[in-house]
């Protein structure tokens, strides 16, 4: 008679995905950090193979359910504001071929989320010059290339827009123009990893049009 495993891998993945989703929604962790912390909370110091861990798609599904269940009264407005901030900066940086990515694009952004933009330009230094001319003080770091090769320079800053508004973290990753080739193709599930200003503007318009009817009492 064979021994049953101490853990059910499917159940472990579900628990880690649910815990990671909560950490993202409530604490603003990124997916990698949330997954590591969730694994420690669920398994303690037990070491498991990577196959026991959920992938980002599973975590995203749990995150959507968590937001719908616990933040449905606030998250749509928070998402709309972040998309409007992203669109504002994409219009400012239009000459550098900007695209939006991450939670602001896929609809899972909330008050803890930052705006992630990607510029595809051969004039990368001009992006920094533009920000300096706008009196924007930014930090410089590196972000892993979305294709998994090397790192790309990233300019990060806080933006309020209005004096009384909560600051929004904005990260501008600088890519070469040629990096855009094939980068806007949909995946197997029909999802886009990045979108241009026209696509984001359409999302904002759709949400704005739907808001009055959805908020009626």
Image (cartoon, rainbow, N blue to C red):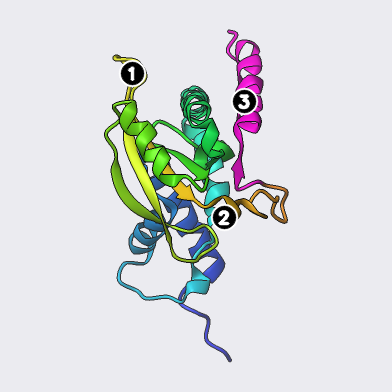
**Mark 1 or mark 3: which comes first in sequence?**
1
- Give the residue at the far bottom of this rendering: 1
**Mark 2 or mark 3: which comes first in sequence?**
2
**Closer to the camera in the image, 41 or 184:** 184
Residue placed at 65% from the left, 15% from the top?
Answer: 209
Marks 1 and 3 sit apart, C-alpha to C-alpha, by 21 Å
Q: Which residue is mark 3?
A: 201
Q: Which residue is mark 1?
A: 165
Mark drawn on residue 58: 2
Q: Is residue 129 above or below residue 142?
A: above
Marks 1 and 2 sit apart, C-alpha to C-alpha, by 33 Å
**Closer to the camera in the image, 109 or 121:** 121
Could you classify mark 3 by the number of other residues whose Cα lies within 10 Å: few (under 14), some (14-19), or many (20 or more)? Answer: some
Residue placed at 49% from the left, 24% from the top?
Answer: 88
Q: Position of residue 116 (x, y in %)?
A: 46, 41
- Mark 2 element type: helix
Judged left or right of residue 29, residue 96 is: right
In the rendered image, residue 196 lying in the magenta stretch gets the answer yes
Q: Is residue 32 above or below residue 97?
A: below
Q: Position of residue 173 (x, y in %)?
A: 44, 47
In the rendered image, residue 134 lying in the magenta stretch gets the answer no
Could you classify mark 1 by the number of other residues whose Cα lies within 10 Å: few (under 14), some (14-19), or many (20 or more)? Answer: few
Query: Which contiguous range is marked in magenta?
Result: 192-217
- Mark 1 element type: loop
In which quadrant of the rendered view does residue 143 lie?
bottom left
**Mark 1 or mark 2: which comes first in sequence?**
2
- Mark 3 element type: helix
Residue placed at 60% from the left, 31% from the top?
Answer: 197
Decide: marks 2, 3 in contact (CB < 8 A)? no
């Amino acid at each position: 008679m064979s021994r049953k495993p101490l853990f059910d891998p499917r159940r472990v993945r579900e628990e880690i995905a649910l815990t990671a989703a909560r950490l993202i929604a409530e604490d603003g962790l990124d997916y990698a950090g949330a997954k590591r912390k969730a694994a420690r909370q669920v398994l303690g110091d037990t070491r498991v193979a990577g196959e026991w861990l959920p992938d980002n798609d599973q975590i995203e599904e749990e995150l959507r359910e968590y937001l719908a269940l616990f933040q449905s009264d606030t998250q749509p407005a928070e998402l709309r504001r972040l998309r409007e901030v992203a669109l504002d900066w994409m219009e400012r940086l239009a000459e550098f071929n900007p695209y939006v990515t991450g939670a602001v694009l896929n609809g899972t952004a909330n008050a803890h989320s930052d705006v992630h933009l990607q510029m595809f330009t051969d004039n990368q230094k001009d992006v920094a010059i533009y920000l300096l001319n706008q009196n924007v003080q930014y930090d410089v770091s590196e972000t892993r290339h979305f294709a998994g090769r090397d790192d790309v320079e990233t300019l990060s800053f806080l933006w309020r827009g209005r004096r009384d508004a909560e600051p929004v973290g904005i990260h501008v990753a600088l890519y070469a123009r040629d990096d855009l080739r094939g980068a806007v193709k949909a995946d197997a599930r029909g999802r886009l990893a990045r979108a241009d200003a026209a696509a984001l503007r359409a999302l904002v318009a759709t949400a704005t049009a739907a808001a009055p009817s959805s908020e009626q009492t």
